[in-house]
């Protein structure tokens, strides 16, 4: 039910937007399918947040190794 509601909303928006952003963590796993259904890029804030945290941690490790 949840997934279909999200996909329905994405289909409705696809013709009006350049990309779709999921801010809710429960939607993250739906991003690949949403991209297939809509032909739009799909961004997810949980993924972007984790990638940013990874980059910061790597940077701190490199600085600590100097």
Image (spheres, rainbow, N blue to C red):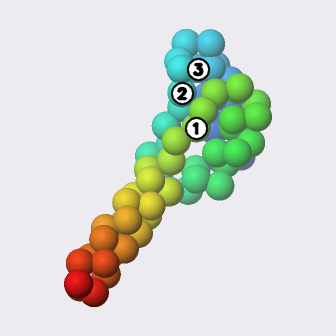
**Residue drawn at point x = 50 percent, y = 47 percent:** 44
Identify whether 28 is placed above or below 11. Answer: below
Which percent across, then down, holds residue 42? 58, 37
Which percent across, then down, holds residue 59? 30, 71
Q: Verify CB contact (< 8 Å) between mark 1 and mark 2.
A: yes
Give the alpha-carbon distance from disc 2 to disc 3, as whole Å.
9 Å
Q: Residue furthest bottom?
A: 65
Give the alpha-carbon distance from disc 1 to disc 2, as whole Å.
6 Å
**Residue drawn at point x = 53 percent, y = 20 percent:** 18
Compared across the picture, whether 42 is left or right of 34 comes to: left
Count of labels in the image: 3
* Secondary structure type for disc 2: strand
- Closer to viewer: mark 2 or mark 3: 2
The quadrant of the picture occupied by the C terminus is bottom left
**Residue drawn at point x = 69 percent, y = 35 percent:** 35
User: Counting residues from the N terminus, which is met first, the one under dot 1 or under dot 3?
Assistant: 3
């Amino acid at each position: 039910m949840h997934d279909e509601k999200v996909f329905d909303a994405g289909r409705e928006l696809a013709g009006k937007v350049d990309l779709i952003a999921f801010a809710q963590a429960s939607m993250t796993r739906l991003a690949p399918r949403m991209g297939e259904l809509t032909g739009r890029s799909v961004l997810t804030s949980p993924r972007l947040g984790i990638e940013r945290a990874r980059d910061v941690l790597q940077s701190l490790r490199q600085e600590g190794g100097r």
